[in-house]
Amino acid sequence: MAADIDNVEERVTQQAAQPVPQPASLPETAPARVSAKTAKVGQQHPIKIYLQVWGYLFVLSTMSYLVDYFHVEGMLRWGLIVTFMFLKAGLIVAIFMHMFWERLALIYAILVPPLCLGTLILLMAIESDYTFWTRIIFFGKGP
Amino acid sequence: MTATTSTETAHGVPAAAGLRSLAADWSSDQEVFKQVHWGKAMMWIFLLSDTFVFSCFLTSYMTVRATTTVPWPNPSEVFGLEIGGQSVPLLLIAIMTFVLISSSGTMAMAVNFGYRRDRLKTTLLMLATAAFGATFVSMQAFEWTKLIVQEGVRPWGNPMGAAQFGSCFFMITGFHGLHVSIGVIYLSIIASKVARGHYERKGNYEVVEIAGLYWHFVDLVWVFIFALFYLW
């Protein structure tokens, strides 16, 4: 990492001196040499990893179904459901959608904006609590 | 993120590692998503916007469910199936979940075989994915029919409980089903182009991965709908 910091300036100058890059994978313009390189760089992983993730997703789905089947209730139910949900979502995004191997610039550009949904959910939770108690107080318990 | 340390930029300049690469990419004044096909970056940005659409649906579902003073219908019973005179909870939904996960598995392998230039396997796996997707939509059509005709669920009310149940259900699963249907058409088109050797001539199979991104997103959304609507 220390060596990295040292040559940052040099690297930036070097990058700035480069000609405007042809998008390496633009099909119309890509010469054979470039596309050969793209083929090397393109996402290539052993088939085994997909089969493993497939298996994990099956197991996780079965477990979340069993939560319902055995009528697990209360905090345990919600905890398990949400845990399995996020594990499955993580596996799909990281492995199937190849996010794990993408550049950090893309990962942050895609995964950071959804975090602001937490604010929306929090605000709506507060608001719905208010609406619920208003209905109870002024309209009584349901029609 | 050990994988990012070994990557290089398109011109052989060694890329910085970790957060420094993030700063370098965004400040490079050329292109941000280096070595990422523009179509792939655009698909990701579209999927990000779609994430917000579905999040708005699910958040509004949370809101109406939390505000209603009438009990919410129990999805476990509403979506149960009678098998041999015994009611099995959520059976159809569980099968739909497994069908969609399987379609995601075949799609991931199709992308992999695409990059290996294996046209036949790519085409067959993509068609299998589309077939799984069509199966999913058919089962959803069956579920809707059962709910509307037998259970009498309408967007404005139902005999089981809170009136908002129907509108949330039809809106969320309907929009998801629309995504699956569009995905089936999209995958069929790309699969036929793969079969005809369109991408062989161009020497670039990234289109398959982009289609795969869309398909995995559809599966991803179902993960959230399954957990938050059917199991909650």
Image (cartoon, coloured by chain):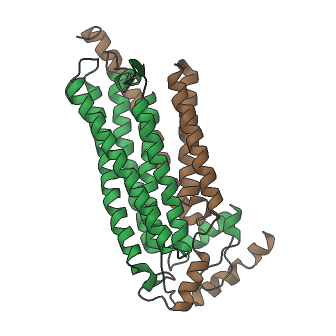
Chain colours: A brown, B green
Residue lying at 57% horizontally and 37% vertically, measured from the top left = A84
Q: Nearer the viewer, residue A47 or A132?
A: A47
Total labels drawn? 0
The image position of residue B107, as x and y in percent, is 48, 59
Q: Residue B105: tell me if it is visible.
A: yes
Above-or-below relation of B142 to B207:
above
Q: Can you name the residue that lies furthest to the right here?
A: A2
Question: Residue B135's x, y, as percent?
Answer: 36, 47
Q: Position of residue A17 (x, y in %)?
A: 59, 90
- Counting from the top left corner in percent of width and height, residue B126 is at 43, 62
* Viewer-side residue, B149 vs B216: B149
Please state if B143 lies on the left or on the right of B18 as rendered: left
**Residue at x 56%, y 80% (from the top left corner):** A38
The answer to whether B82 is drawn above or below residue B214 in the figure is above
Of all residues, the one furthest to the top in this rendering is: A140
The quadrant holding residue A125 is: top left
Quadrant of the drawing holding the C terminus of chain B: top left
Residue at the spot x=46%, y=60% of the render?
A: B213
Query: Does residue A122 show up?
Result: no
**Residue B145 appears in which quarter of the rendering?**
top left
Query: Does residue A98 appear to the left or right of B73 in the view shown?
Result: right
Q: Return the residue found at the far front.
A: B84
| Image-quadrant location for residue B85 | top left
Q: Quadrant of the N terminus of chain B?
A: bottom right
Q: Residue at x 32, y 27 (%)?
A: B64
